[in-house]
């Protein structure tokens, strides 16, 4: 990277790309060429910076200045002002939502301050389509070290000692998994990378694949070496075209460099990686379902044991880890187990990537040491709640997780604490909710997802979740009765207790955790027929405040069902029997005379 | 048991066979084959599944079982401009449902339907991973971020 | 073998490694309820999706309840099968299942014989909470010539899917859709008629609920019986007599031949005949064809294809027409006994009693559902009048007898009528796997060698192994015989025939595991393969008790040839008793 004095790093992750970051790149290049700076300034498309809510992101190195929400037409200004004249473009700098302070240097931004990037070490730093940049940052050194200096069992020991646990959701110790797979004798074994990231609201796997694909390839080869497998498969969502594109490039480049294929680094070790595409089934995140899907079948889970490590893909011992788990492996091998195990909590080592979304200021991807508190994540890194609203809950672990509240804010986050609190790590989605979110509706939303994604194989998940969803919908519609709450809890517990796979076993978590933490909201729905958050349509009533109403008739004219009556210049009235609660009148009223009761 | 006539054009059959051959007619590659077929035909009509079944030696009932299992596969053709509304959690909490309702109203469609002139089709999907832009709407390849119900009419106008 | 010790409900038990909790509990006399699981042990058939979750038990140190049907015992395991947690879970799951199941038990074909109904009863379910507003998964009903599919009643036990795919390799059924709308159905949720279904009926035989049932032809038969202008005759297949008694509380394997005849007579049939007679006729035709082909083959005639395949099983015929149409010249052209009977009844016998074939109604009692389809095949009717008008299953007959308030237990033994009621032991054993070929060997041997057989029990051809083979010495000429029951096993032999690897001279195929005694129309075995074995024993016992045990010695067969057909494989015999097969493989029609 020495030839150039200035680097412009432009985020090419899905979020920024969707906001035309590719056009920003073109425009920047055009401008630089027009100014004759092509040999001094390089524009690089990188992976995700994790600052998705403010994308597209352009980072100027070595100044460490981050520009946010850059539009294609801003390219000219950035080049003319910053590159040529060395002046920061103030209007494109990040503004702290609380202090309103303008912060240019990424080191001083709270969103980055608390982070420790191991998995995301290269995301937003290197050009993911160039293997040389990965190698320049110690890439493939771990593979070399493992192949030439370590025996397979030594590799496994390092991974075991590091204390790393699977980042896919359940938190099974990675080294132990490898060890089991290595001990099962077979003529062929497989290494599978689970990149079927299905949690709505979680996108760390995608970001790693898009931003640093080689880290996964390298780790898979290391795993293959340690368990005795020569074939690897990546099961990746078809909905991630950019990740697929970059993986293909990366695999080809690794082949050209002799880092995949036959006789890797002249050690006689063979390892190859092929891609298999998911086709839209959340349940395929479950490893047995994933394996069936890779075999061209319906992605239905089967009972364990046998575990994939005993009988997996094509009936052979198969080690399945997810993207994030793999991405940390090369670093663990290079820096050692002790280094890794010093990060995190007693039983959860290392860092965890979280996808922050929802009613939070800094939407994006962050990586923090295990044990960081929710408060630090939401209020420091995440910049707090949008529009100054009040924090209500955060859903961790996606649809399988649960809602945590105010009282959990200072709990150090790790696998075990989350489970103890009735939620789970899941893949690391964090959806933040504010006072406007009705928790019954939130539970209903997650159940809607589960009902959609249940494979239908076992009765409790197939039918039970449908019944849960029905009951929640009735409660939101104001048709619930107090006894329903007991039924909700019983059904939830039985579904958890009896379902075949992890999907069903965790699907009632949103119901149970909201029952535990927001009983008052449920009771308001079933007893008072009120939705405290004002989200459930059938439990709201639009009312005109006689004091504010001037009788302008605007509301009556906009009402689609003629529910509003009243003479000009007289107080109007909404007939609740006719009103469909579309909210058009409230929006139209200039005098704040319409409110929801 | 009665013989069903499957009507496909010669070049369609050839294309499906070519796709299957490129995956070595391996039944394990069924999902990849279906992906390629859907990419080519836009959807997976029964006829296509019949030919795939024959080529890979997988019973057509099983092919259909796979097609109906995965939400990515569809047996109905999409409109010229397929509209997908992300209903992932991040989009949901930021009001994606209202945006979907607006599209339904504007187009007079339900999810999974196509307009009479085959111009637009409406579908919902789970998280495209652009949570930073929530709520997100995709029209064909183009992504619209931070869409409000009021934007719907303008988005549709672009395709008139 | 390695054994494991564990405790179930505080009782210690020792079982071989690999035993499931369910089976270990059984050893202790603890009967954990199971629903979706099914095993036909001797036939190597197991359905173990672990889907219904009724059989869950508490296993100490496990977070969740474990399905006992599919969880293997481990050393030192502590299992509790009826804690309040378990009982509550079982009940709630059962309520879930019932909440998505129609409540029309009053008119359901499986009522009284429904595993779901029994389970609801056993678990004491009296109420389904939230039923008033519980959405149901509903589907279009499908009426095919043999089978009715009512997926509203499907509980996703996947037994039918296992039978259709793993056992029969027919591949007509698959799990389709996802989640709440998941069900087992043919491709595109089309009717079975448009699928690769062979109507073997094994799906019906294992369905625990009313989701898969046979088309009921009893009302049609009743109407014919009530019509004074019709002469109604009935033929009963060999396997029926070995199973019908089960529907009246008799022990499996009880032979009810005579009582069945009496029952049929009291139901009002004009003549009670025996399909066994037609089975003897089949042996004459098929055996002659075999010898003809064999001898031409031995002389080097390349047009004489070996092996010859039996063709009396309609499910099997449907199977090769669908999957092996290129081999359609290989099976014997002999019609099945049912259709031979019909052809003779509506010509020879109709003439004899001077009744127009249009006024003669031929009813068959079959262990089979494919027979319903077979008798509806176009080639088996003359000017729109079928040779066999209606085929009803053993189950339908049992219900018919009950409707007429006849208790089979208390009936006198009756006798079949002449001339189409006389049969030999060879005809009887058609009902079990290996029986057709054994009957054929008895006749072919004597016709080929001109010698008398010293021993008639070819035990080497018997048994329940899926694929069997034996070489029979035809006086110095070794004849290689293959036997397959279950279409998946048949496929293996057929693949060899197709690739030219097959060394057999003759192959017997039965579509159903166990042969006709395990047919899709038999009383439900509910997964107990002992029942099928008992039926086979009954069949062989009947054979043994017959004075004549070789088809060519049946005096009425000899008479039939003398009076009517001439010789086996004569022109007339060919016209009436032989058929041809069709290519039913799906075609891709290319649009220009």
Image (cartoon, coloured by chain):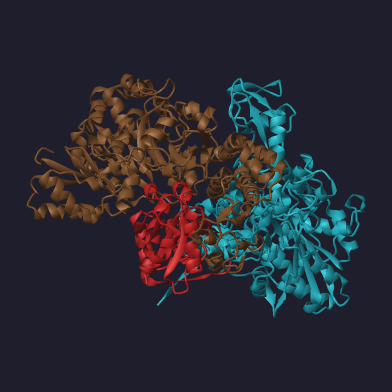
Q: Give the camera-side residue of A566 and C44.
A: A566
Q: Residue A157 at x, y = what percent?
A: 35, 21
Quadrant (top left, top right, bottom left, bottom right) of the N terminus of chain C: top right
Q: Which chain is cyan?
A: C
Q: Is residue C548 left or right of residue A35?
A: right
Residue B124 against residue A127 in the figure, above or below: below
Q: Residue at x 13, y 42 (%)?
A: A6
Q: Which chain is red?
A: B
Q: Which chain is brown?
A: A
**Which quarter of the picture shows residue B147?**
bottom left
Q: Is residue C140 left or right of residue A264?
A: right
Q: Give the camera-side residue of A188 and A149.
A: A149
Q: Is residue A461 left or right of residue A33?
A: right
Residue A185 against residue C276 in the figure, above or below: above
Q: Residue C244 at x, y = what percent?
A: 80, 52
Quadrant (top left, top right, bottom left, bottom right) of the C terminus of chain C: bottom left
């Amino acid at each position: 990277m020495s030839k150039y004095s200035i680097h412009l790093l432009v985020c090419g992750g899905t979020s920024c790309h969707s906001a035309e970051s590719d056009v920003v790149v073109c425009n920047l290049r055009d401008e630089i060429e027009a100014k004759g700076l092509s040999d001094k300034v390089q524009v690089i498309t990188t992976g995700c910076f994790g600052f998705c809510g403010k994308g597209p992101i352009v980072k100027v190195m070595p100044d460490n200045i981050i520009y946010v929400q850059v539009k294609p037409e801003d390219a000219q200004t950035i080049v003319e002002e910053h590159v040529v004249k060395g002046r920061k473009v103030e209007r494109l700098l990040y503004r702290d939502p609380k202090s309103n302070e303008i912060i240019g240097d990424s080191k001083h931004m709270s969103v980055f301050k608390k982070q420790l990037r191991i998995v995301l070490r290269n995301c937003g730093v290197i050009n993911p389509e160039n293997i040389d940049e990965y190698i320049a940052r110690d890439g493939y050194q771990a593979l070399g070290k493992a192949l030439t200096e370590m025996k397979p069992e030594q590799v496994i020991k390092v991974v075991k000692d590091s204390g790393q646990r699977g980042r896919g959701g359940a938190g099974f110790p990675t080294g132990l998994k490898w060890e089991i797979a290595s001990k099962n004798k077979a003529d062929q074994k497989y290494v599978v990378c689970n990149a079927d990231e299905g949690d709505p609201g979680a996108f760390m796997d995608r970001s790693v694949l898009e931003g640093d694909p080689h880290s996964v390839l390298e780790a898979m080869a290391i795993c293959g070496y340690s368990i005795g497998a020569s074939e690897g498969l990546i099961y990746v969502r078809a909905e991630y075209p950019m990740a697929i594109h970059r993986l293909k490039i990366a695999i080809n480049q690794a082949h050209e460099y002799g880092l995949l294929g036959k006789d890797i680094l002249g050690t006689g070790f063979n390892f190859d990686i092929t891609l298999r595409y998911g086709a839209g089934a959340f349940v395929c995140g479950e490893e047995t379902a994933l394996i069936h899907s890779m075999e061209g079948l319906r992605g239905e889970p089967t009972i364990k044991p046998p575990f994939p490590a005993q009988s997996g893909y094509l009936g052979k011992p198969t080690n399945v880890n997810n993207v994030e788990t793999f991405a940390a492996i090369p670093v663990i091998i290079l820096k050692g187990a002790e280094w890794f195990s010093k990060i995190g909590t007693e039983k959860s080592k290392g860092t965890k990537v979280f996808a922050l979304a929802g009613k939070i200021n800094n939407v994006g991807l962050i990586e923090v040491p295990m044990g960081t508190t929710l408060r630090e994540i939401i209020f420091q890194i995440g910049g707090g709640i949008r529009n100054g609203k009040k924090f209500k809950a955060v859903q961790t672990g996606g649809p399988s997780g649960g809602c945590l509240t105010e009282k959990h804010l200072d709990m150090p986050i790790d696998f075990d604490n989350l489970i103890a609190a009735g939620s789970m790590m899941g893949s690391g989605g964090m959806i933040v909710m504010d006072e406007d979110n009705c928790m019954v509706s939130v539970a209903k939303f997650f159940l809607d997802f589960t009902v959609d994604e249940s494979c239908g194989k076992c009765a409790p998940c197939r039918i039970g979740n449908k019944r849960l969803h029905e009951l929640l919908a009735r409660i939101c519609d104001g048709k619930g009765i107090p006894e329903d709450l007991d039924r909700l809890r019983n059904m939830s517990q039985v579904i958890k207790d009896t379902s075949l796979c992890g999907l069903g076993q965790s699907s009632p978590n949103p119901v149970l955790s909201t029952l535990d933490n927001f009983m008052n909201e449920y009771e308001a729905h079933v007893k008072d027929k009120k939705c405290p958050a004002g989200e459930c349509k059938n439990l709201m009533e639009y009312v005109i405040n006689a004091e504010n109403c001037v009788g302008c008739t605007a509301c009556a004219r906009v009402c689609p069902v003629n529910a509003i009556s009243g003479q000009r210049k007289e107080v109007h009235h909404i007939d609740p029997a006719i009103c469909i609660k579309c909210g058009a009148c409230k929006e139209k009223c200039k005098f704040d005379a319409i409110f929801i009761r | 048991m009665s013989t069903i006539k499957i009507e496909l054009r010669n070049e369609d059959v050839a294309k499906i066979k070519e796709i299957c051959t490129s995956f070595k007619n391996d039944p394990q590659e069924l999902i990849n084959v279906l992906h390629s077929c859907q990419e080519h035909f836009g959807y997976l009509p029964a006829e296509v599944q019949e030919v795939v079944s024959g080529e890979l030696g997988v019973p057509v009932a099983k092919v259909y079982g796979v097609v109906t299992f995965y939400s990515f596969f569809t047996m109905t053709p999409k409109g010229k401009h397929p509209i997908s509304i992300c209903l992932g959690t991040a989009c949901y909490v930021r009001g994606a449902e209202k945006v979907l309702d607006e599209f339904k109203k504007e187009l007079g469609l339900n999810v999974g339907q196509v307009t009479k002139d085959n111009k637009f089709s409406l579908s919902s999907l789970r998280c495209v991973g652009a949570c930073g832009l929530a709520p997100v709407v995709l029209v064909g390849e183009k992504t619209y971020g931070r869409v409000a119900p009021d934007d719907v009419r303008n988005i549709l106008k672009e395709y008139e | 073998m390695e054994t494991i010790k564990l405790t179930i409900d505080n009782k210690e038990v020792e079982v071989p490694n690999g035993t499931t909790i369910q089976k270990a509990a059984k050893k202790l006399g603890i009967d954990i309820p199971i629903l979706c699981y099914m095993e036909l042990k001797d036939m190597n058939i197991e359905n173990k999706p672990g889907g219904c979750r009724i059989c869950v038990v508490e296993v100490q140190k496990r977070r969740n309840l474990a399905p006992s049907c599919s969880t293997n015992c481990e050393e030192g395991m502590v299992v509790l099968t009826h804690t309040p947690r378990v009982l509550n879970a079982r009940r709630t799951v059962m309520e879930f299942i019932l909440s998505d199941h129609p409540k029309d038990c009053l008119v359901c074909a499986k009522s009284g014989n429904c595993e779901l109904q029994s389970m609801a009863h056993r678990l004491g379910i009296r109420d389904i909470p939230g039923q008033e507003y519980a959405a149901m998964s509903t589907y279009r009903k499908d009426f095919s010539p043999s089978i009715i599919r009512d997926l509203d009643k499907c509980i996703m036990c996947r037994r039918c899917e296992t039978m259709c795919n793993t056992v029969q390799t027919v591949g007509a059924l698959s799990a389709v859709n996802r989640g709440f709308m998941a069900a087992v159905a043919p491709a595109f949720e089309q009717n079975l008629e448009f699928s690769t279904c062979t109507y073997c009926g094994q799906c019906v035989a294992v369905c625990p609920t009313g989701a898969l049932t046979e088309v009921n032809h009893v009302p049609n038969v009743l109407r014919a019986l009530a019509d004074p202008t019709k002469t109604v005759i009935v033929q009963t297949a060999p396997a029926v007599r070995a199973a019908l008694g089960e529907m009246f509380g008799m022990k499996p394997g009880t032979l009810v031949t005579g009582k069945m005849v009496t029952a049929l007579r009291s139901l009002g049939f004009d003549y009670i005949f025996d399909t066994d007679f037609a089975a003897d006729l089949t042996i004459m035709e098929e055996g002659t064809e075999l010898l003809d082909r064999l001898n031409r083959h031995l002389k080097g005639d390349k047009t004489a294809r070996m092996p010859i395949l039996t063709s009396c099983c309609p499910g099997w015929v449907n199977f090769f027409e669908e999957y092996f149409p290129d081999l359609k010249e290989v099976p014997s052209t002999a019609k099945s006994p049912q259709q031979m009977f019909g052809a003779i009844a509506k010509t020879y016998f109709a003439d004899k009693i001077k009744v127009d074939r249009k006024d003669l109604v031929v009813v068959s009692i079959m262990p089979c559902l494919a027979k319903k389809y077979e008798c509806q095949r176009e080639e088996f009717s003359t000017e729109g009048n079928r040779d066999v008008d209606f085929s009803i299953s053993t189950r339908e007959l049992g219900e018919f007898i009950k409707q007429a308030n006849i208790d089979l237990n208390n009936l006198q033994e009756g006798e079949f009528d002449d001339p189409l009621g006389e049969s030999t032991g060879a005809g009887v054993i058609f009902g079990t796997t290996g029986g057709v070929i054994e009957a054929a060997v008895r006749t072919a041997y004597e016709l080929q060698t001109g010698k008398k057989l010293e021993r008639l029990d070819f035990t080497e051809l018997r048994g329940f192994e899926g694929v069997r083979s034996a070489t029979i010495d035809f006086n110095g000429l070794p004849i290689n015989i293959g036997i397959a029951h279950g279409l998946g096993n048949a496929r293996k032999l057929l693949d060899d025939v197709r690739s030219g690897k097959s060394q057999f001279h003759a192959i017997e195929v039965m579509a159903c595991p166990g042969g006709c005694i395990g047919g899709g129309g038999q009383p439900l075995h509910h997964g107990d393969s002992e029942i099928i074995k008992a039926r086979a024993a009954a069949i062989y016992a009947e054979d043994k008790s017959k004075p004549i045990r070789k088809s060519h010695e049946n005096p009425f067969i000899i008479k039939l040839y003398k009076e009517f057909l001439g010789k086996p494989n004569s022109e007339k015999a060919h016209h009436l008793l032989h058929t041809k097969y069709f290519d039913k493989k799906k075609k891709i029609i290319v649009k220009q």
